[in-house]
Amino acid sequence: MRRVESMLLAIQLKDIINYRVPASKILEALTAASCQETFCYERAELLGDAYLKWVVSRFLFLKYPQKHEGQLTRMRQQMVSNMVLYQYALRKGLQPYIQADRFAPSRWAAPGVLPVFDEDNKDVELSLFDQERELNGSVPGKDHLGYGYEDDEMEDGELESDSSSYRVLSSKTLADAVEALIGVFYVEGGKNAANHLMKWIGIQVDFDPEEIECSIRPTNVPESVLRSVNFDALESSLNIKFNDRGLLVEAITHASRPSSGVSCYQRLEFVGDAVLDHLITRHLFFTYTDLPPGRLTDLRAAAVNNENFARVAVKHNLHLHLRHGSSALEKQIRDFVKEVQNELSKPGFNSFGLGDCKAPKVLGDIVESVAGAIFLDSGRDTAVVWRVFQPLLHPMVTPETLPMHPVRELQERCQQHAEGLEYKATRNGNLATVEVLIDGVQVGIAQNAQKKMAQKLAARNALVALKEKETAEAKERGDEDTKKKNGSQTFTRQTLNDICLRRNWPMPLYRCVNEGGPAHAKRFTFAVRVNTSDRGWTDECVGEPMPSVKKAKDSAAVLLLELLNNWYSCQ
């Protein structure tokens, strides 16, 4: 019945929007991951976010030809920020249609029927999240009815376990739902459907075609500048012939090279960044239809970033045509080109922007500005842009070739092993030094002019050191596999639980003896005892300080198992 009720709401919203899109897809765009359904809006949100950014960027670029890139960026932010989308959602009354709560059968009731709530089962039915909120005293009184709206840090869910009318929806959830609706409409009906949804929600990006045509005039680049550019080589690299070569000159002109009659590439970069983001996101979305939202987001991040675009520029020799007047920039480009050429010399290797040398921003910028120039020169045809850039971006990142950022990889490894991770950064002149500490012990260090690059290199060094340590420990335990085959065991608290079950003893009683250390490197000490059937309570066994509660309990359980082994020979 919950699904039927949700579908009816989606059908109602479909009728209000008045466009032929399947109600099931609208329901998907309204369903948050917190519902724990088999579908949610996150994939569609990713697509809708990129399309919204593109359409608004195009509108601003064409509508305001005199605005520079910084002004256009601020104007775009004022049109598509989460808070603005949240306000649009409120004005259209989207909040009742959004599904953000996990279904609890005991709390559901048909419309017009009061829900029956069993107080005896309250603690069982509350989610851990709800319990924590009640313990923290953050549950509002029962006289607060309706919808609550919190900041982006608030999770979605029901506040009152016995009130089916009180929900919390974060502003981000409402904004995400708007982007997801745009994405769903784009998938089902193309740009016309997506534009219809945007217009309905209140995002006005319509413009007068005649007015736009008047604002777009052929560039008037001096002949001397045109003669200085090797158009044959540049157009050959791009595999396209420009109708207005002045646009191409603008796309490769840096602000450090002022020329009469030639603008720098920043406006073209603004629109090119948006069109590439949209086209690449669309490609990934429709290519990997079964990929989870998180992995799709990772693919997009790896494909759409300045570091990756800079490598594309070097790979196709676009850097050779850059018009600039900075000796410092020239050195940065030269050093980066050497790094990329070294990467390209390794068969099958592609860092997708995770190399050891930070790219000069200008190289990624000219890739985006060239995309903007092609967009304008082709009569604002995104199909032409993609036809040019798809081979330039090859090989595109795939789920199989997706690299993980060393900082993230190290963080996930430490979380998996319940280890405390800390970075310590210092700067001496122009050099930043970053240390990696795990449980207070240094495992990696690196230096670089940029702090972020130093952190990335330090994390990579730490991962190498940890893997070498694990390999050495595995060699020292060379006979471990043999022992396991012969029946040897690794004792944990689960072993202790199994013994208690076999002997019909109560479950072991654990007690936290000590909890200390800084927040990033907590240490826990636990004690455990068990009530045996024939000898009563055992002595309390205190384990070693450990970085997690689970490991601390395991440590105590091992000692108690040794004690029981001495009593009963029950190893």
Image (cartoon, rainbow, N blue to C red):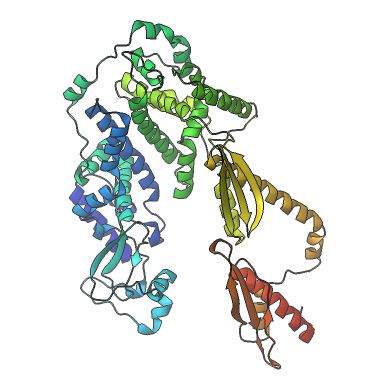
Image location of residue 88, percent across then percent down: 22, 49
Q: Nearer the viewer, residue 103 or 124?
A: 124
Residue at horizontal 44 percent and vertical 43 percent from the top: 289
Q: Is residue 231 left or right of residue 460?
A: left
Tell me where residue 184 sits by quadrant.
Answer: top left
Q: Nearer the viewer, residue 474 or 339?
A: 339
- The answer to whether residue 236 is above or below residue 368 is above
Tell me where residue 154 sits by quadrant.
Answer: bottom left
- The answer to whether residue 208 is above or below residue 150 is above
Quadrant that contains the C terminus: bottom right
Image location of residue 345, percent across then percent down: 64, 26
Image location of residue 266, percent across then percent down: 36, 26
Residue at horizontal 26 percent and vertical 76 percent from the top: 142
Q: Nearer the viewer, residue 135 or 156?
A: 135
Quadrant that contains the N terminus: bottom left
Q: Is residue 499 visible?
A: no
Tell me where residue 53 sits by quadrant.
Answer: top left
Image location of residue 294, percent across then percent down: 46, 49
- The answer to whether residue 177 is above or below residue 534 is above
Q: Is residue 241 visible?
A: yes
Residue at horizontal 58 percent and vertical 56 percent from the top: 421
Tally the marks: 0
Q: Nearer the viewer, residue 62 or 399?
A: 62
Q: Is residue 273 left or right of residue 481?
A: left
